[in-house]
Image (tube, rainbow, N blue to C red):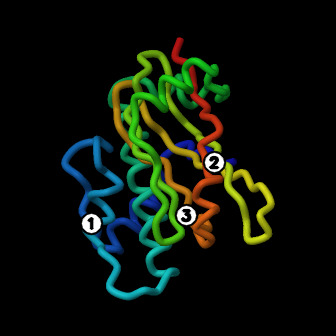
Amino acid sequence: MMRIAAPGAAVLALIGLAGLSPPALAAGPGCFASCMAERPPKTDDYYAFADTVKLCRDRCDALALEGLKTTGLYEAYAACTPAPLSKEDFRDLRAKNPSWQSQFNTFTWDITNPFKDKILVEIEVQTQDMNLSTVSLTSAGVIAPGQSGTFVVPDFFDGYPAVRYATKVRGAKACTLP
């Protein structure tokens, strides 16, 4: 798993080249959905769609990191070692947020961070592959306390209808603020 240390010029340049306009402020509620709405799929070409998904994910993460810098939380985030949420905190997170979605081989989970002392940085998703073997995937992101964001897993297989019943978010990691 790779955490984004800082929004790179390359990501911001790609955003500009792709014609995506930055939102007025930081990555607030609906950043990912807004970004995807700006570039609706015009064909059923999965690879073009996956490129847009990754671009929107990167853009929203870059904006979230800028928000951390603005609020003075970036240093704590950059210095932290993410730790799994306790079972109670994970249950609270799940209870206070709608369920995940899987569409067009993309897994998304829109989350509002209910914790005042944690920056959410990762989730683990468990599903099954074509052989019905268990597979675990992770999604990195940056969701500050009280903020909303979307964890995204592009290239997420959602073929067999029964596999959707086996898919679940198994855990989350966060950076605890001092």
Amino acid marked by disc 3: Pro
The residue to which callout 3 is attached is: 154
Q: Amino acid at mark 2?
A: Val
Sooner in the amino-acid sequence: mark 2 or mark 3? 2
Q: Earlier in the sequence, mark 3 or mark 1?
A: 1
The percent position of residue 163, horizontal first and vertical second, equals: 64, 61
Q: Secondary structure at mark 3?
A: strand
Q: Residue at x 52, y 17 (%)?
A: 177
Q: Is residue 12 left or right of residue 118?
A: left
- From the viewer's perspective, tell me whether residue 110 is left or right of residue 88: left
For residue 89, what is the image quadrant?
top right
Q: Residue at x 44, y 24 (%)?
A: 73
Residue type for callout 1: Ala
Q: Which residue is mark 2?
A: 125
20 relative position to 65: left or right: left
- Relative placement, left or right, of 54 versus 162 is left
Residue on which disc 1 sits: 37
